[in-house]
Image (cartoon, rainbow, N blue to C red):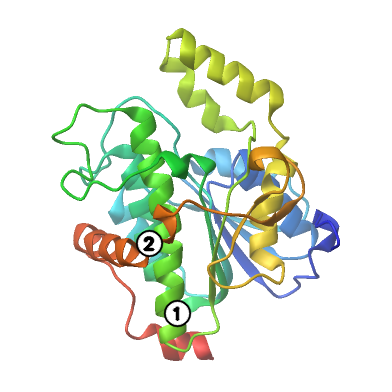
Amino acid sequence: MTTFTAAHIPDLTGRTVVITGANSGIGRAAARALAARSARVVLAVRDPAKGRAAAATITGDTVVRRLDLADLSSVRAFADDFTEPIDVLINNAGLMIPPPGRTADGFELQFGTNHLGHFALTNLLLPRIRKRVVTVSSTGHRRGAIDFGDLNWERRPYRAFAAYAQSKLANLLFTAELQRRLTEAGSPVLATAAHPGMAATDLLGHLDHERSSLHRLRTTVISRFSQSDDDGALPTLYAAVADVPGGGYAGPGGLLQGRGAPKLVSRSRTARDAALARRLWTASAELTGVTFPAAATDAMMK
Protein backbone atom coordinates (compact mmCIF):
# COMPACT_ATOMS: atom_id res chain seq x y z
CA MET A 1 0.00 0.00 0.00
CA THR A 2 1.36 3.44 -0.94
CA THR A 3 2.03 5.73 2.01
CA PHE A 4 -0.23 8.76 1.69
CA THR A 5 1.46 12.15 1.65
CA ALA A 6 0.41 15.62 0.55
CA ALA A 7 1.90 14.77 -2.84
CA HIS A 8 -0.97 12.31 -3.36
CA ILE A 9 -3.62 15.05 -3.28
CA PRO A 10 -5.01 15.21 -6.83
CA ASP A 11 -5.31 18.36 -8.88
CA LEU A 12 -8.25 20.28 -7.41
CA THR A 13 -8.69 22.96 -10.03
CA GLY A 14 -12.29 24.16 -9.98
CA ARG A 15 -13.00 22.61 -6.55
CA THR A 16 -14.02 24.57 -3.46
CA VAL A 17 -13.08 23.42 0.03
CA VAL A 18 -14.42 25.04 3.21
CA ILE A 19 -12.32 24.52 6.35
CA THR A 20 -13.47 25.70 9.76
CA GLY A 21 -10.78 26.94 12.11
CA ALA A 22 -8.29 27.23 9.26
CA ASN A 23 -6.36 30.15 10.72
CA SER A 24 -4.01 27.92 12.76
CA GLY A 25 -2.80 24.40 13.50
CA ILE A 26 -3.82 21.47 11.36
CA GLY A 27 -6.60 23.51 9.76
CA ARG A 28 -4.12 25.97 8.33
CA ALA A 29 -1.81 23.12 7.29
CA ALA A 30 -4.69 21.43 5.46
CA ALA A 31 -5.64 24.70 3.80
CA ARG A 32 -2.07 25.21 2.63
CA ALA A 33 -1.85 21.69 1.18
CA LEU A 34 -5.18 21.94 -0.65
CA ALA A 35 -4.50 25.41 -2.03
CA ALA A 36 -1.16 24.11 -3.32
CA ARG A 37 -3.17 21.64 -5.44
CA SER A 38 -5.24 24.50 -6.92
CA ALA A 39 -8.35 24.21 -4.72
CA ARG A 40 -10.24 27.36 -3.84
CA VAL A 41 -9.99 27.25 -0.04
CA VAL A 42 -12.41 29.11 2.19
CA LEU A 43 -11.02 29.80 5.64
CA ALA A 44 -14.08 29.87 7.90
CA VAL A 45 -12.79 31.53 11.07
CA ARG A 46 -14.06 33.29 14.17
CA ASP A 47 -11.52 36.12 13.86
CA PRO A 48 -11.24 37.42 10.27
CA ALA A 49 -8.03 39.31 11.08
CA LYS A 50 -6.33 36.07 12.10
CA GLY A 51 -7.83 34.41 9.05
CA ARG A 52 -6.34 37.04 6.76
CA ALA A 53 -2.97 36.67 8.46
CA ALA A 54 -3.11 32.92 7.86
CA ALA A 55 -4.24 33.38 4.25
CA ALA A 56 -1.24 35.63 3.65
CA THR A 57 1.04 32.64 4.38
CA ILE A 58 -0.76 30.38 1.87
CA THR A 59 0.06 30.29 -1.82
CA GLY A 60 -3.07 29.86 -3.91
CA ASP A 61 -6.72 30.87 -4.05
CA THR A 62 -8.02 31.61 -0.55
CA VAL A 63 -11.05 33.39 0.82
CA VAL A 64 -11.64 34.39 4.45
CA ARG A 65 -15.16 34.36 5.88
CA ARG A 66 -16.31 34.88 9.44
CA LEU A 67 -17.83 31.93 11.28
CA ASP A 68 -18.32 31.61 15.03
CA LEU A 69 -19.37 28.03 15.76
CA ALA A 70 -20.24 29.02 19.31
CA ASP A 71 -23.07 31.21 18.02
CA LEU A 72 -25.84 29.64 15.95
CA SER A 73 -26.81 33.02 14.52
CA SER A 74 -23.28 33.26 13.05
CA VAL A 75 -23.56 29.71 11.69
CA ARG A 76 -26.86 30.57 10.01
CA ALA A 77 -25.49 33.83 8.60
CA PHE A 78 -22.46 32.01 7.15
CA ALA A 79 -24.68 29.38 5.52
CA ASP A 80 -27.12 31.99 4.18
CA ASP A 81 -24.31 33.98 2.60
CA PHE A 82 -22.62 30.95 1.04
CA THR A 83 -24.43 30.41 -2.24
CA GLU A 84 -21.78 28.69 -4.37
CA PRO A 85 -21.25 24.91 -4.58
CA ILE A 86 -18.92 23.30 -2.04
CA ASP A 87 -16.96 20.19 -2.96
CA VAL A 88 -15.57 19.39 0.48
CA LEU A 89 -16.53 20.70 3.92
CA ILE A 90 -13.89 20.06 6.60
CA ASN A 91 -15.26 20.46 10.13
CA ASN A 92 -11.89 21.10 11.74
CA ALA A 93 -12.35 23.84 14.34
CA GLY A 94 -12.49 22.85 17.96
CA LEU A 95 -11.77 23.65 21.58
CA MET A 96 -9.83 21.40 23.93
CA ILE A 97 -10.27 21.76 27.69
CA PRO A 98 -10.94 25.51 27.88
CA PRO A 99 -12.09 27.14 31.12
CA PRO A 100 -15.79 26.45 31.83
CA GLY A 101 -17.97 28.47 29.52
CA ARG A 102 -21.18 28.67 27.50
CA THR A 103 -21.89 29.39 23.86
CA ALA A 104 -24.07 32.29 22.81
CA ASP A 105 -27.01 29.87 22.85
CA GLY A 106 -26.25 28.53 26.33
CA PHE A 107 -24.61 25.21 25.39
CA GLU A 108 -21.56 23.87 27.21
CA LEU A 109 -18.70 25.45 25.28
CA GLN A 110 -16.97 22.32 23.95
CA PHE A 111 -20.13 20.38 23.09
CA GLY A 112 -21.67 23.49 21.58
CA THR A 113 -18.64 24.40 19.47
CA ASN A 114 -17.08 21.07 18.57
CA HIS A 115 -20.34 19.23 17.87
CA LEU A 116 -23.49 21.34 17.76
CA GLY A 117 -21.95 24.18 15.74
CA HIS A 118 -20.65 21.75 13.13
CA PHE A 119 -23.88 19.76 13.18
CA ALA A 120 -25.85 22.89 12.31
CA LEU A 121 -23.32 24.13 9.77
CA THR A 122 -23.17 20.83 7.90
CA ASN A 123 -26.92 20.45 7.61
CA LEU A 124 -27.41 24.06 6.54
CA LEU A 125 -24.72 23.75 3.84
CA LEU A 126 -25.60 20.22 2.76
CA PRO A 127 -27.71 21.18 -0.29
CA ARG A 128 -24.57 22.80 -1.74
CA ILE A 129 -22.06 20.06 -0.87
CA ARG A 130 -21.05 17.81 -3.78
CA LYS A 131 -18.32 15.45 -2.55
CA ARG A 132 -17.48 15.02 1.14
CA VAL A 133 -17.97 16.15 4.71
CA VAL A 134 -14.91 15.50 6.88
CA THR A 135 -15.23 15.93 10.64
CA VAL A 136 -12.17 16.01 12.88
CA SER A 137 -12.46 13.93 16.04
CA SER A 138 -9.83 12.70 18.52
CA THR A 139 -8.54 9.56 20.20
CA GLY A 140 -10.03 11.22 23.28
CA HIS A 141 -13.43 10.05 22.03
CA ARG A 142 -12.64 6.66 23.61
CA ARG A 143 -13.12 8.19 27.04
CA GLY A 144 -16.34 9.89 26.03
CA ALA A 145 -19.91 9.17 27.04
CA ILE A 146 -23.14 10.82 25.93
CA ASP A 147 -25.22 11.83 28.93
CA PHE A 148 -28.61 12.64 27.44
CA GLY A 149 -29.86 13.74 30.84
CA ASP A 150 -27.24 16.48 31.01
CA LEU A 151 -25.64 17.08 27.61
CA ASN A 152 -24.69 20.63 28.58
CA TRP A 153 -23.28 19.96 32.06
CA GLU A 154 -25.94 21.87 33.93
CA ARG A 155 -26.47 19.32 36.71
CA ARG A 156 -23.14 17.49 37.04
CA PRO A 157 -19.91 18.90 38.45
CA TYR A 158 -18.07 20.15 35.38
CA ARG A 159 -15.09 18.09 34.20
CA ALA A 160 -13.33 19.69 31.26
CA PHE A 161 -11.74 16.60 29.74
CA ALA A 162 -14.93 14.56 30.09
CA ALA A 163 -16.79 17.34 28.27
CA TYR A 164 -14.13 17.35 25.56
CA ALA A 165 -14.32 13.56 25.19
CA GLN A 166 -18.12 13.76 24.92
CA SER A 167 -17.82 16.31 22.10
CA LYS A 168 -15.29 14.19 20.20
CA LEU A 169 -17.43 11.06 20.57
CA ALA A 170 -20.32 13.15 19.27
CA ASN A 171 -18.24 14.01 16.17
CA LEU A 172 -17.95 10.31 15.28
CA LEU A 173 -21.57 9.49 16.03
CA PHE A 174 -22.59 12.47 13.89
CA THR A 175 -20.44 11.20 11.00
CA ALA A 176 -21.98 7.72 11.22
CA GLU A 177 -25.57 8.97 11.26
CA LEU A 178 -24.89 11.53 8.53
CA GLN A 179 -23.52 8.78 6.30
CA ARG A 180 -26.55 6.59 7.04
CA ARG A 181 -28.87 9.40 6.00
CA LEU A 182 -26.86 10.21 2.88
CA THR A 183 -26.91 6.58 1.82
CA GLU A 184 -30.63 6.31 2.48
CA ALA A 185 -31.21 9.43 0.39
CA GLY A 186 -29.17 7.99 -2.50
CA SER A 187 -26.65 10.83 -2.27
CA PRO A 188 -23.10 10.45 -3.65
CA VAL A 189 -21.75 12.66 -0.84
CA LEU A 190 -19.56 10.84 1.68
CA ALA A 191 -19.25 11.59 5.39
CA THR A 192 -15.83 10.72 6.77
CA ALA A 193 -13.88 11.49 9.94
CA ALA A 194 -10.26 11.87 10.97
CA HIS A 195 -8.06 12.53 13.94
CA PRO A 196 -4.57 14.04 13.94
CA GLY A 197 -2.97 11.74 16.48
CA MET A 198 -0.68 13.55 18.85
CA ALA A 199 -0.35 16.88 17.07
CA ALA A 200 0.95 20.04 18.71
CA THR A 201 -1.55 22.72 17.78
CA ASP A 202 -2.97 25.92 19.25
CA LEU A 203 -5.51 23.72 21.05
CA LEU A 204 -2.82 23.21 23.68
CA GLY A 205 -2.96 26.89 24.50
CA HIS A 206 -6.27 26.29 26.24
CA LEU A 207 -4.45 24.15 28.81
CA ASP A 208 -2.63 27.16 30.21
CA HIS A 209 -5.34 27.68 32.81
CA GLU A 210 -4.71 24.22 34.23
CA ARG A 211 -2.14 24.48 37.01
CA SER A 212 -2.08 20.94 38.36
CA SER A 213 1.06 18.83 38.01
CA LEU A 214 -0.92 16.28 35.98
CA HIS A 215 -2.00 18.82 33.38
CA ARG A 216 1.48 20.36 33.17
CA LEU A 217 2.94 16.91 32.62
CA ARG A 218 0.32 16.09 29.96
CA THR A 219 1.08 19.33 28.11
CA THR A 220 4.83 18.66 28.23
CA VAL A 221 4.46 15.11 26.93
CA ILE A 222 2.11 16.14 24.12
CA SER A 223 4.38 18.99 23.06
CA ARG A 224 7.51 16.83 23.09
CA PHE A 225 6.20 13.78 21.26
CA SER A 226 3.59 15.30 18.97
CA GLN A 227 3.68 15.50 15.19
CA SER A 228 4.03 18.74 13.27
CA ASP A 229 0.92 20.50 12.06
CA ASP A 230 1.67 19.34 8.52
CA ASP A 231 1.85 15.69 9.61
CA GLY A 232 -1.16 16.11 11.89
CA ALA A 233 -3.19 17.39 8.93
CA LEU A 234 -2.49 14.31 6.79
CA PRO A 235 -5.34 12.16 8.21
CA THR A 236 -7.77 15.01 7.46
CA LEU A 237 -6.44 15.29 3.92
CA TYR A 238 -6.60 11.51 3.52
CA ALA A 239 -10.25 11.51 4.64
CA ALA A 240 -10.95 14.39 2.24
CA VAL A 241 -9.42 13.10 -1.01
CA ALA A 242 -8.35 9.44 -0.75
CA ASP A 243 -10.38 6.42 -1.81
CA VAL A 244 -12.07 5.77 1.54
CA PRO A 245 -15.57 4.49 2.30
CA GLY A 246 -18.39 6.57 3.68
CA GLY A 247 -18.16 6.56 7.45
CA GLY A 248 -14.41 5.87 7.25
CA TYR A 249 -12.23 7.13 10.09
CA ALA A 250 -8.63 8.10 9.35
CA GLY A 251 -5.75 8.56 11.74
CA PRO A 252 -2.01 8.01 12.07
CA GLY A 253 -0.98 4.40 11.53
CA GLY A 254 1.77 4.31 14.14
CA LEU A 255 1.81 3.17 17.76
CA LEU A 256 -1.47 3.93 19.55
CA GLN A 257 -2.48 6.04 16.54
CA GLY A 258 -0.21 8.75 17.89
CA ARG A 259 1.85 9.49 14.80
CA GLY A 260 2.74 8.07 11.41
CA ALA A 261 1.27 7.94 7.92
CA PRO A 262 -2.54 8.09 7.76
CA LYS A 263 -4.76 5.07 7.25
CA LEU A 264 -8.23 3.91 8.25
CA VAL A 265 -8.22 3.28 12.00
CA SER A 266 -10.49 1.81 14.65
CA ARG A 267 -12.90 3.63 16.90
CA SER A 268 -14.54 2.74 20.20
CA ARG A 269 -17.53 0.42 20.43
CA THR A 270 -19.62 3.34 21.65
CA ALA A 271 -18.69 5.32 18.54
CA ARG A 272 -20.05 2.42 16.44
CA ASP A 273 -23.45 2.37 18.20
CA ALA A 274 -25.98 3.16 15.45
CA ALA A 275 -28.89 3.58 17.88
CA LEU A 276 -26.87 6.02 19.96
CA ALA A 277 -25.95 7.96 16.83
CA ARG A 278 -29.60 8.30 15.83
CA ARG A 279 -30.58 9.40 19.33
CA LEU A 280 -27.82 12.01 19.41
CA TRP A 281 -28.91 13.31 16.00
CA THR A 282 -32.46 13.78 17.30
CA ALA A 283 -31.22 15.59 20.40
CA SER A 284 -28.88 17.78 18.36
CA ALA A 285 -31.66 18.72 15.96
CA GLU A 286 -33.88 19.70 18.88
CA LEU A 287 -31.13 21.82 20.46
CA THR A 288 -30.11 23.63 17.27
CA GLY A 289 -33.38 23.71 15.36
CA VAL A 290 -31.52 22.28 12.34
CA THR A 291 -31.61 18.80 10.82
CA PHE A 292 -30.99 16.85 7.62
CA PRO A 293 -32.55 18.95 4.84
CA ALA A 294 -35.33 17.23 2.95
CA ALA A 295 -34.42 19.26 -0.12
CA ALA A 296 -30.78 18.21 -0.02
CA THR A 297 -31.01 15.03 -2.06
CA ASP A 298 -31.89 16.52 -5.44
CA ALA A 299 -29.32 19.30 -5.05
CA MET A 300 -26.55 16.86 -4.10
CA MET A 301 -27.35 14.58 -7.03
CA LYS A 302 -26.71 17.35 -9.56
Q: Secondary structure at mark 1?
A: helix
* CA neighbours of label 2 inside 10 A, class few (<14), some (14 to 19), many (20+): few
Image spot of residue 213 (x, y percent):
47, 8
* Foreground pick, 75 / 296: 296
How packed is label 1: few (under 14 Cα within 10 Å), some, or many (20 or more)?
Answer: many
Outermost residue on the front side: it is 269
Horizontally, is 155 left or right of 8 in the view?
Answer: left
Q: Position of residue 83 (x, y in %)?
A: 47, 74
The residue type indicated by label 1 comes to Leu
- Residue at x 80% of width, y 55% of height: 6
What residue do we see at 70% from left, 67% from top? 241
**Residue identified by numbered label 1:** 182
- Residue 185: where, in percent of width, then height? 41, 87
Q: Residue at position x 56%, y 19% from top? A: 219
Tell me residue 190's x, y (percent): 55, 74
Depth check, mark 1 against mark 2: the one in front is 2
Give above or below for 159 relative to 169: above
Residue drawn at (39%, 28%) of the image: 98
| Residue tagged 2 | 273
Mark 1 vs mark 2, CA separation in Å: 18 Å
Quarter of the N terminus within the rendering: bottom right
Q: Is residue 226 left or right of residue 217?
A: right
Local secondary structure at mark 2: loop
